[in-house]
Image (spheres, grey):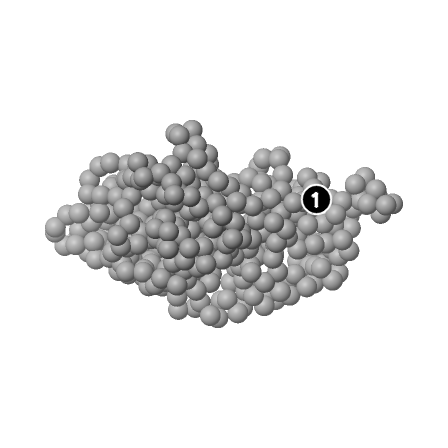
Amino acid sequence: MYMDNSATSPLDPEVLKEMEPFLKEKFGNASTFYSLGIEARKAIEIARENVAALIGANPQEIIFTSGGTESDNLAIKGAAYKWKNKGKHIITSVIEHPAVMETCKYLETQGFEVTYLPVYEEGLVRVSDVEKAMRDDTIIITIMHANNEIGTIQPIAEIGKIAREKGIYFHTDAVQTVGKIPIDVTELNVDLLSISAHKLNGPKGIGALYERKGIVLEPLIHGGGHERGIRPGTENVPSIVGLGKACSLASSHMEENMDYLTNLRDTLIDGVLEQIEESYLNGDRTSRLPNNAHFRFSGIEGESLVLHLDAKGIAASTGSACSSKKLEPSHVLMALGLEEVDAHGSLRLSLGKENKVEDIEYTITSIKEAVETLRKLSPLWCSAENL
Ligand code: PLP
């Protein structure tokens, strides 16, 4: 029972079917002018249209990259390097994915100054904080659309509005939202938006950056003129085709998937909170991804809980796949103001359309049993009970 879709999601069989010919007989280089190449070029442009359609963009505004990490780097470093003579100030939040956070930290070593905005108990950035942090030398604001751990959805349209008024570039890492909730780049007032295929049942190692018409970035790599020279390199045609298909499937099933997942998520959240004492939901209850349930349980270790659930056939995680190997508590949970010991007792379940209602019932029972078992062994739980 796979419940770690925020880490990665299974490849949709329809996506695989669409990709297959481009892994086999349709192997042409899209820059060539004979039939095989023209066919590959056409497939890339259809994929570009499908990605654009999912987010309300023009196809010319889509640049294919190797994934979310590269899109984030290209947006932030590309803007910073291009506009460094205008200013060297960047605004971001304390709960960004490492692809943004580490990029900002790297830019600090290159003479840029970064303001990291807080998110408070509910895990949300406040628009008033963004406004206060804006300066004459601010060149880019980068705030994620939805957090990959706690699933909170940020007020992107409002932040984008004030950034636009001040002529500051606005980037959002939408890796966790694209394909899960409706996105319109015009309504969101964003200039740059990162996409990753493997979070929406597409292949790994492919993504895109939406770059609004008129936005100018410095390329990070140099080579041929592919992707308007912003991201050169022979195109990964099968994966681009896969991303395009994943986007078109997400567009056609958006409403039904959202309703379905929201219902599963709410059943899971209500069940856990009602049936397990001292269990809490991390992050805002309503402004959250339809597939994200992130809990904490007093007196236990999240890692042990994940192992117990694995033994019961449930794949879940403590937080993001990128940080779950580290022993430090997640920077996202610490940003909510949690004590270290509470942050360690967290569990993320990120649902997918393959999950069934019966899976949810089984999951609630399994979590309950695992939490009870672990609490019996936990000195932390004894002390909590004795308080
Ligand atoms: N940004 C967010 C919010 C993510 O969740 C992830 C993946 O975990 C990434 C960026 C990185 O994307 P990719 O794995 O395609 O490099």
Q: Quadrant of the N terminus?
A: bottom right
Is residue 12 in view? no
**Whole-percent x, y for residue 162 in the image:** 42, 55
**Whole-percent x, y for residue 163 in the image:** 40, 52
Is residue 344 in view? yes
Extreme residue in the right direction: 386
**Whole-percent x, y for residue 204 in the image:** 40, 47
Name the kind of residue labelled 1 in the image.
Asp
Q: Residues within 10 Å of mark 1 (few under 14, many from 20)?
A: some
Q: Does 6 sit above or below residue 378?
A: below
* Mark 1 residue's CB less than 8 Å from ligand 1: no
- Residue at left 54%, top 65%? 261
User: Of helix, strand and loop, which one carries label 1?
Assistant: helix
| Total labels drawn | 1
Extreme residue in the left direction: 34
Looking at the image, residue 375 sits to the left or right of residue 154; the answer is right
Looking at the image, residue 224 sits to the left or right of residue 126; the answer is left
Q: Which residue is mark 1?
A: 342
Q: Quadrant of residue 61?
A: bottom left
- Residue at left 72%, top 49%? 297
Q: Does 84 sit above or below residue 241?
A: above
- Residue at left 17%, top 51%? 37
- Residue at left 61%, top 60%? 285
Looking at the image, residue 36 sits to the left or right of residue 347; the answer is left
**Whole-percent x, y for residue 292 in the image:** 57, 57
Depth check, front residue: 279 or 8: 279
Q: Quadrant of the C terminus?
A: top right
Depth check, front residue: 64 or 351: 64
Depth check, front residue: 143 or 74: 143
